[in-house]
Amino acid sequence: MDDDWKGIKEMASKQDGPWPPPVFTHGDLNPFNIMVRDGRVVAIIDWEFAGWYPYYWEYTAAWYGNETRKSWQGVLARFLDPYPEELKIDKTRQRYWGDL
């Protein structure tokens, strides 16, 4: 329980701090939405979840959207800026409140 409370306190303190402006992001980046031809990305499809989100959203959404694909999680940092602290905090949020 103490670890749970610590995670919630970390999440609250991060959310209470200053926030940079939101960024426009795809919102559902996963291997099925990236079209590749001859080893090159030629299109990114499926934009219905696109919008203005916190700076870390693309990374955490891509991580969660593909939890069963550990290899995908392993390559995310190659093409997205990783945000490990934000991912940790978002895991706490997901654990208690799910997809709000």
Image: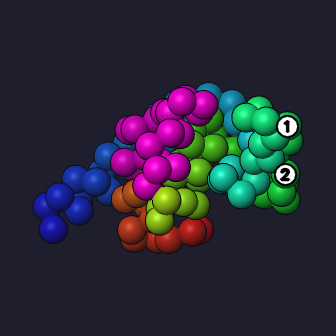
> Residue 41 versus residue 56: which sits nearer the camera?
41
Residue at figure coordinates x 78%, y 57% from the top left = 49
Q: Position of residue 43 (x, y in %)?
A: 85, 41
- Give the Cα separation between the discs numbered 1 and 2: 10 Å
**80 over 32 or under it: above or below:** above
Residue type indicated by callout 2: Ile
Label 1: which secondary element? strand
Label 2: which secondary element? loop
In this picture the colour scheme is rainbow
Please give the residue where the numbered disc 2 appears in the rendered image: 45
Residue 42's disc number = 1
Residue 86 visible in the current orientation = no
Q: Is residue 84 left or right of residue 30?
A: left
Q: Is residue 76 magenta?
A: yes
Q: Is residue 74 magenta?
A: yes
**18 over 59 or under it: above or below:** above
Q: Position of residue 42 (x, y in %)?
A: 85, 37
Q: Position of residue 55 (x, y in %)?
A: 62, 35
Magenta extent: 70-89
Q: Is residue 100 left or right of residue 16?
A: right
Residue at figure coordinates x 37%, y 59% from the top left = 92
Label 1: few (<14), some or many (≥20) within 10 Å?
few
Q: Position of residue 59 (x, y in %)?
A: 56, 42
